[in-house]
Amino acid sequence: MARIYISLGSNIEPEQHLQAGLISLRACFGPLRLSSMYESEAVGFSGTNFLNMVASAETDLNIAAVVAQFKQIEQNHGRLAGAKKFSPRTLDLDLLVYDHVVCQTPVVLPRAEIVNNAFVLWPLAELAPELIHPVVDKSYARLWQEYDKDSQRLWPVTFEWPPGLTF
């Protein structure tokens, strides 16, 4: 079984879409570990703020199958295939880490956004502080500690899950 880390984000009815996305992820991958929820300004375009978090799960699927499953979940929750990269979204799921794999195909792993975007790095550092980034050879906690926090605005938010909903 491989340990995977998944970035989730939304800025269109984000509470609804993130909750639905997590329910779908749990149905596909079983129990999830979740970071806190964070709010951030849109990066790369002018738009409403995003809610972001990171989830972790275990899977016996290969990388291509995991990514295909994410795309299907996104589409099931209103994401339009072929939409511009920097645009509002109902649900964005990105594979950040698949065990300690470093690859270029079928996707780049570990995902470059880890070291570039606070909305990925902070929740990942919270969920897996001691895990070592296999390319830069630093823990995610250390990477977050060294990150230029003035470069992107990000703050934790309280997120109330419906009663009885567990991951």
Image (cartoon, rainbow, N blue to C red):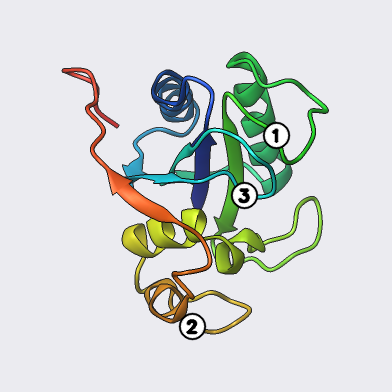
Q: Is residue 107 left or right of residue 48?
A: right
Q: Nearer the viewer, mark 3 or mark 2?
A: 3
In which quadrant of the rendered image does the C terminus lie? top left
> Residue type at mark 1?
Ser
Dot 3 surroundings within 10 Å: few (below 14), some, or many (20 or more)? some
In the image shown, does 44 or 75 lie closer to the viewer?
Answer: 44
Q: Secondary structure at mark 3?
A: loop
Which residue lies most toward the front here? 46
Q: Nearer the viewer, residue 98 or 85?
A: 85
Tell whether 80 sits left or right of 101: right
Res 2 visible: no
Marks 2 and 1, the one that precedes in the sequence? 1
Residue ID at (68%, 29%) = 71
- The location of residue 18, given as percent across then percent down, is 44, 27
- Residue at 63% in and 15% down: 78
Above or below, 152 against 159 in this view is: below
Badge 2 is on which residue? 138
The amino acid type, in three-letter code, at marker 3 is: Val
**How far separated are the C-alphas under marks 2 and 1?**
31 Å
Residue 67: x %, y % from top left:
68, 39
Contact flag, marks 3 and 2 (Cβ < 8 Å): no
Question: Residue 20 has which mark?
Answer: none
Q: Which residue is mark 3?
A: 43
Pick the front one: 16 or 70: 16
